[in-house]
Image (tube, grey):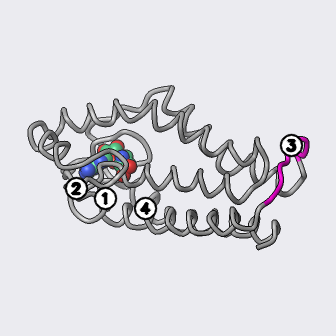
Amino acid sequence: MTQMTAALIWAAGIVVWTIIRWPHRRKARRMQTVTDKRSTMERISLGLTILGLVILPALHLSTGLFEFANTSFWSSAGWLGLVAMIAFLYLFYRSHKDLARNWSVSLEIRKDHQLVDTGVYKNVRHPMYASFWLWGIAQFLLIPNWIAGLSGLFSIAVLYFSRIGAEERMMHQQFGAAYEEYCRNTYRLIPKLF
Ligand code: SAH
């Protein structure tokens, strides 16, 4: 694989990500919210995610910004990046489908919110965040630059670690014993199979 192909795979991933998310964002705007735990930190980390996963790599690829931080490109890394990108998009699509009307871009409980524990949520509590980690790994493998390649993983780490505790506390407050039981049967990011 050439470096140009790897860059095109990264760009195609962004297009497919937008296509998957678009209808859910539109529907979510019409849903009623009963609990809203959005904080300033959360708004900052969401902005940082767009910066690290979309804006910085796009600027690097289109203008050569951060060229001083370039590193060598490996074809095998490009192929692994393609696999990580496909896995990200599949898991992202499936988690949106399974969460359906319970999804929101930030921490919110919807009117008639239901605890989803089926589909990709059966063995993992945060498949959508797991998919984001795969996205960051794909970016790192597809873009051979220490800044534009790693900025995705950095911003996902900020989003994940600043949000995960608050999200689980919110879910526990809402669903009590049912959520405790669900936590016993799942891990956060990797499937609990036994
Ligand atoms: N953390 C999940 C969902 C991300 S979307 C994941 O990574 O897959 C964030 C919203 O999803 C939160 O505001 C919360 O209300 C909702 N949510 C998270 N887990 C849920 C579950 N198991 N069932 C229903 N809603 C859930």
| Mark 2 CB within 8 Å of ligand 1 | yes
**Residue at the spot x=42%, y=34% of the render?**
163
The number of numbered discs placed on residues in the rendered structure image is: 4
First of labels 4, 1 by sequence position:
4
Cα distance in 3D space between marks 2 and 4: 16 Å
Cα distance in 3D space between marks 2 and 1: 6 Å
Q: Nearer the viewer, mark 2 or mark 4?
A: 2
Q: Amino acid at mark 2?
A: Val
Q: Amino acid at mark 4?
A: His
Asked whether the beta carbons under mark 4 and mark 1 sit within 8 Å of each other, the answer is no
The quadrant of the rendering that contains the C terminus is bottom left
Residue 192 or 4: which is nearer the viewer? 192
State the image coordinates of residue 68 (x, y, percent, origin top left): 91, 41
Q: Which residue is mark 3?
A: 66
Q: Which residue is mark 2?
A: 116
**Residue at the spot x=76%, y=73% of the render?**
1
Q: Which residue is mark 1?
A: 99
First of labels 3, 4 by sequence position:
4
Q: Is residue 22 above or below residue 168?
A: below
Label 1 secondary element: helix
Q: Amino acid at mark 1?
A: Leu
Is 148 situated left or right of 67 in this image? left
Asked whether the beta carbons under mark 2 and mark 1 sit within 8 Å of each other, the answer is yes
Cα distance in 3D space between marks 3 and 4: 34 Å
Cα distance in 3D space between marks 4 and 1: 10 Å
Q: Which residues are magenta?
A: 65-73
10 Å crowding of disc 2: few (<14), some (14-19), many (20+): some
Label 4 secondary element: helix
